[in-house]
Image: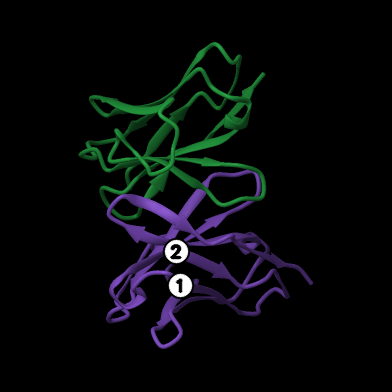
Chain colours: A purple, B green
């Protein structure tokens, strides 16, 4: 069955960067798209962007350009998201989700990122 | 960006009621609309895709409809387990955008 396993919670200092991972199994990763989302606790969800694992092609929400960088490693069927120059406003739960023709049916469990000195 | 105006922000319903949640798109989205349920500390779960299609494994008490640019999620005879936060999502154009969410309590 399809699984998306995200990396564990991160506590990072302001100004630092962090790399989140989303390891997949149960489907053909190399011909699929992956999206990433941000959710501040108690708030709605924002779409960060998506990446096509076949060629690494990306599309970003303008709001997150320069903040998030999406990459993939097809050898390990893993998607990554780098978040740079972190501020307290980047403290949130970040989700990966497989882009499917029938909506986002498969999600990772989320990674909590806390930015604090 | 396409704005999704979701209402109500919260509601409480009994087991015998019909619950309706709506999302109005700021422009036409050609039924590229999905609905999700989220429980505390969990990732969103797909309920409806393409505005009216029921996702695999989702109970038939959930249904989706459209009238113009307004989309609705209906829950007929909700169960206590249906409590949670519901979101709509438009995937017609990027950036994808969610509604603000509806917190549902089933008494």
The x, y position of residue A100, in whole percent, is: 32, 57
Asked if badge 1 and badge 2 are on a common chain, one would say: yes
- Residue A25 got which mark? 1
Residue at the image point whose x is 42% and y is 69% from the top: A26
Residue at the image point whose x is 73% and y is 75% from the top: A13
State the residue position of label 2: A2
The x, y position of residue A38, in whole percent, is: 53, 57
The x, y position of residue A113, in whole percent, is: 66, 66
Cα separation, mark 1 vs mark 2, equals: 6 Å
- Chain ID of residue with mark 1: A
Residue at the image point whose x is 69% and y is 69% from the top: A9
- Callout 2: few (<14), some (14-19), or many (20+) C-alpha neighbours within 10 Å? few
User: The residue tagged with tag 2: helix, strand or loop?
Assistant: loop
- Visible residue check, residue B104: yes
- Chain ID of residue with mark 2: A
Furthest toward the bottom, the residue is: A75
């Amino acid at each position: 069955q399809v699984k998306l396993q995200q990396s564990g919670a991160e506590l990072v200092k302001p100004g630092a960067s962090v790399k989140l991972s989303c390891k997949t199994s149960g489907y053909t990763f190399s011909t699929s798209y992956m999206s990433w989302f941000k959710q501040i606790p108690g708030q709605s969800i924002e779409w960060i962007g998506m990446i096509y694992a076949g060629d690494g092609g990306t599309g970003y929400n303008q709001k997150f350009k320069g903040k998030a960088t999406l990459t993939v490693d097809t050898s390990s069927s893993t998607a990554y998201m780098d978040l740079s120059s972190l501020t307290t406003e980047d403290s949130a739960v970040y989700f990966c989700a497989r882009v499917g023709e029938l909506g986002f049916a498969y999600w990772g469990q989320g990674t909590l990122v806390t930015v604090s000195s | 960006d396409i704005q999704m105006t979701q209402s109500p922000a919260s509601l409480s319903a009994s087991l015998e009621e019909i619950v309706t949640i709506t999302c109005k798109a700021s422009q036409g989205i050609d039924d590229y609309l999905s609905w999700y349920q989220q429980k505390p500390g969990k990732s969103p779960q797909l309920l409806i895709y393409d505005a009216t299609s029921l996702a695999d494994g989702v109970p038939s008490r959930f249904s989706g409809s459209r009238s113009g640019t307004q989309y609705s999620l209906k829950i007929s005879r909700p169960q206590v387990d249906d409590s949670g936060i519901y979101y709509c999502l438009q995937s017609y154009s990027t950036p994808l955008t969610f509604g603000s969410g509806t917190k549902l309590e089933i008494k």
